[in-house]
Image (cartoon, rainbow, N blue to C red):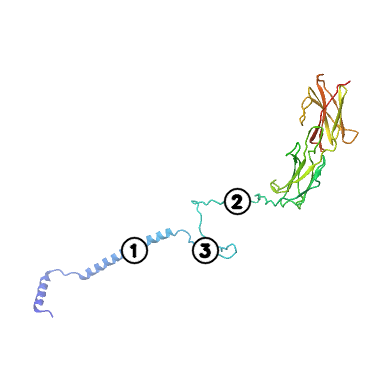
């Protein structure tokens, strides 16, 4: 209970406040509540604005499609290893190469790309097997006779052409090609050919000849683009000497020269030259000269020709000769020794 002194002080204060205006407590309380509601609204608006800005930023960063997601409409392709077993997608290397860091192909990749570039790509030649065997019909070839060659082993698959090459060993044609042919093998890869020879064995009493002591017979299998596929083991054969010693005779009646000769399988031309000395040996024949066609004589292997001799200095000598050709009549294989003509009686 308050004391009397305290009660007296309160009454004194009350008397002093009697003349003061009385505060409108309900209005003050209402105004305070309105201020409180306004502050709460401002705070809520600020929080909402921050949330909105953060949401827009997150949406902008997440604009692309989601990665590593599988849906029913777009299932992920199942990966398998070399043995056909399924591979866990988590074990698959997902490293990619961008344009900023190109990867240079290795030699193996480049070769595979070139080999498989379209249907028209030419495959590389097959590996050549060991040397193949061929057969030559005779160990010694007669003069003017062709060389009969056939395959003992067939050419490998893919062969379109067989190239037969015959090379001279020894004689005046040493190291030079003297025969051969190009032909197609059969379906099994076998082949045979009679190859003509433009050389003979040893021969005597001639001014010039295409001679060889032996022949080196070779063959090669080629594809459609002439690339080599396989080689045959070379075969060495002999060339027999010419059995008949060539002989040439000539007469002159002052106007016409008659030339007769033998030992030649084919001939088409005889010659008469004039000068201060006889023509030199060799295949080349110097000017001036006159030529005439040769015709078969009365005996096999004999020939004759008649040639009109042009005017020439009386001091010059005359010499007659002829060229002999191989049986096909394409290549000259020797020239007879020149015969000096006696003046007419």
Q: Residue at x 26, y 68 (%)?
A: 33
> Rounded to the nearest whole Å, what is the CA distance between mark 2 and mark 3?
30 Å
Q: Earlier in the sequence, mark 2 or mark 3?
A: 3
Q: Circle 3 — which element?
A: helix
CB contact under 8 Å: marks 2 and 1: no
> Rounded to the nearest whole Å, what is the CA distance between mark 3 and mark 1?
45 Å
Q: Circle 1 — which element?
A: helix
Rendered position, 172 above or below 317:
below
Residue 109: image location, x then y, percent: 58, 52
In the image: residue 159, left or right of residue 90: right
Between 240 and 91, the one nearer to me in the picture: 240
Which mark is drawn over residue 91?
A: 3
Residue 281: image location, x then y, percent: 77, 30
Residue count near mark 2 (Cα–Cα under 10 Å), binned few <14, some 14–19, many ≥20:
few
> Rounded to the nearest whole Å, what is the CA distance between mark 2 and mark 1?
66 Å
Question: Mark 3 or mark 1: which is in front?
Answer: 3
Which mark is drawn over residue 109?
A: none
Residue count near mark 3 (Cα–Cα under 10 Å), binned few <14, some 14–19, many ≥20:
few
Between 246 and 134, the one nearer to me in the picture: 246
According to the image, label 2 marks what residue?
111
Q: Earlier in the sequence, mark 3 or mark 1?
A: 1
CB contact under 8 Å: marks 3 and 1: no
Residue 116: image location, x then y, percent: 62, 52
CB contact under 8 Å: marks 2 and 3: no
Quarter occupied by residue 255: top right
Q: Residue furthest bottom?
A: 1
Between 291 and 281, the one nearer to me in the picture: 281
Quarter occupied by residue 61: bottom left
According to the image, label 1 marks what residue?
47
- Quadrant of the rendering where the N terminus is positioned: bottom left
Rendered position, 253 above or below 245:
above
């Amino acid at each position: 209970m308050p004391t009397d002194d305290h009660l007296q002080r309160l009454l004194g204060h009350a008397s002093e406040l009697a003349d003061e205006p009385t505060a409108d407590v309900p209005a003050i309380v209402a105004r305070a509540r309105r201020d409180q509601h306004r502050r709460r609204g401002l705070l809520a608006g600020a929080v909402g604005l921050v949330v909105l800005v953060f949401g827009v930023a997150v949406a902008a960063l997440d604009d692309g499609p989601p990665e590593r997601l599988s849906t029913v409409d777009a299932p992920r392709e199942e990966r398998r290893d070399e043995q056909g077993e399924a591979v866990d997608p988590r074990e698959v290397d997902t490293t990619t190469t961008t344009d900023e860091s190109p990867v240079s192909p290795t030699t193996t990749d480049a070769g595979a790309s070139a080999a498989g570039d379209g249907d028209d790509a030419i495959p590389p030649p097959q590996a050549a097997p060991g040397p193949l065997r061929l057969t030559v019909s005779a160990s010694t070839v007669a003069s003017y006779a062709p060389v009969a060659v056939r395959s003992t082993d067939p050419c490998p698959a893919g062969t379109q052409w067989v190239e037969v090459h015959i090379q001279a060993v020894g004689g005046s044609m040493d190291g030079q090609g003297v025969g051969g042919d190009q032909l197609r093998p059969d379906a099994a890869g076998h082949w045979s050919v009679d190859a003509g020879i433009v050389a003979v064995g040893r021969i005597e009493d001639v001014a010039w000849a295409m001679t060889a002591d032996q022949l080196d017979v070779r063959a090669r299998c080629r594809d459609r683009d002439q690339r080599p596929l396989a080689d045959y083991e070379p075969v060495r054969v002999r060339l027999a000497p010419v059995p008949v010693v060539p002989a040439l005779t000539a007469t002159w009646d002052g106007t016409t020269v008659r030339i007769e000769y033998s030992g030649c399988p084919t001939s088409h031309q005889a010659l008469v030259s004039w000068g201060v000395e006889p023509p030199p040996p060799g295949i080349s024949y110097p000017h001036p000269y006159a030529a005439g066609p040769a015709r078969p004589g009365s005996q096999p292997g004999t020939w004759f020709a008649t040639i009109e001799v042009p005017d020439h200095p009386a001091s010059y000598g005359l010499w007659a000769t002829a060229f002999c050709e191989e049986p096909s009549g394409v290549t000259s294989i020797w020239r007879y020794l020149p015969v000096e003509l006696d003046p007419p009686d």
